[in-house]
Structures are given as C-alpha cells and as structure tokens.
Image: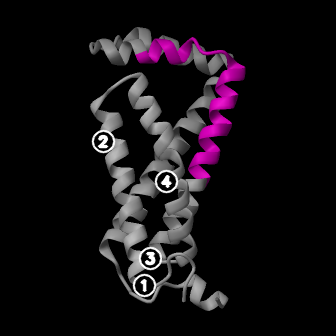
Amino acid sequence: MSSASFSKVPHGNDAVLRLIAGFKLVKAASLLAVTFGAFELVHPSKAQVAREWLYVLQPSHHYLSHALAKILSVKPHTLELVGVATGMYAALFLVEGYGLWRERLWAEYLTTGITLSFIPLEVYELVEKQSVAKIGVIVVNIAIVMYLVLRLRRDHRWPFRR
C-alpha cells in the first residue's frame, strides 16, 4: 500500500467522520483543562486560593461541593500523575481528532484500535458501578468503532486491503 493511499480517504467531507473528529477534539480540550488545572493545584498557594474561593462561593449543589473538596484534598504527587496522564490522553485525542478531521486513513485505523481497546475497561467500570453516563460512553464508543469499521470495509481497506 503506497503512502498516498494510506494518507487520504477517497470520499470527501464525511459528516459523521467530522462529528467523530469534533467529539475527539472536545474530549482533548476537556482533558487539557484538567491537565492544566491539576498542574496549577500542585502549587500549595494556588490550592489555597482555590480553597478560599470554594469557601466564599459555597456551591449549593452537594455533589459539586463534595467533588471540589475532594479535588483540593489530593496530594501534589497525585495531581502531577493526573496531569501527566490526562495530558497524554489529550495528545492522543488531538491526534485522532486532527487525523479524522483531515480524513486520514491512518486516523481511522488508530481511532478504531484505540477506541476498541477501551471498551473492555469501560464495561468493567460499568459492572463495578453503574451509571447512565458510563452506559452512554460505551454506546458512543461502540457506535464509533462500528461506523469506522463499516466505513473501512466499504472502502475495501479493512484489514489493510487496497
């Protein structure tokens, strides 16, 4: 398979592919926010400012207040690990989103493989503690994998055929 055939998919402007790309880019942006937030809270002075804001604002929603208090009680080393891990995932989602937006074949393979690899972990998490959000994530990821596999098969590029 030549590099030219591996780089660009023959069909132009696939709206579903763009939607998946946008979804990946939004996930990347969200994870980057978590990454920067985690690294900011590593500094004790910044964590203290966040605690003061939490005290002043006193969020009325119980879950929000509990979540913020829990985040502020995390040790700096753990925050650094969270920052590194979310930064790596953000980079991965940026690569996937960019490649899918540009309709690159390598991005379809990459996204299919990576998304498929997370489904068993997501199912395990769902078994451990059920939630509508977890079910939604699994359904969306299965739909993404199914769409990409069907698209690759339709284009006679699964697995790696010309």
Amino acid type, residue under disc 2 in the picture: Gly
Q: Which residues are magenta?
A: 67-91
Classify 63 as above or below 80: above
Classify 46 as above or below 13: above
- Distance from disc 4 to disc 3, alpha carbons, whole Å, reads 15 Å
Q: Residue at x 50, y 51 (%)?
A: 28
16 lies left or right of 31: left
Mark toward the start of the polypeptide (1 vs 2): 2
Q: Residue at x 55, y 84 (%)?
A: 161
Residue bearing mark 4? 116
Classify 161 as above or below 44: below
Residue bearing mark 1? 155
Residue bearing mark 2? 136
Q: Residue at x 32, y 69 (%)?
A: 16
75 lies left or right of 50: right
Mark toward the start of the polypeptide (2 vs 4): 4
Decide whether residue 82 is among the magenta residues.
Answer: yes
Tell me if label 3 and label 2 are in contact, CB under 8 Å: no
Tell me if label 1 and label 4 are in contact, CB under 8 Å: no
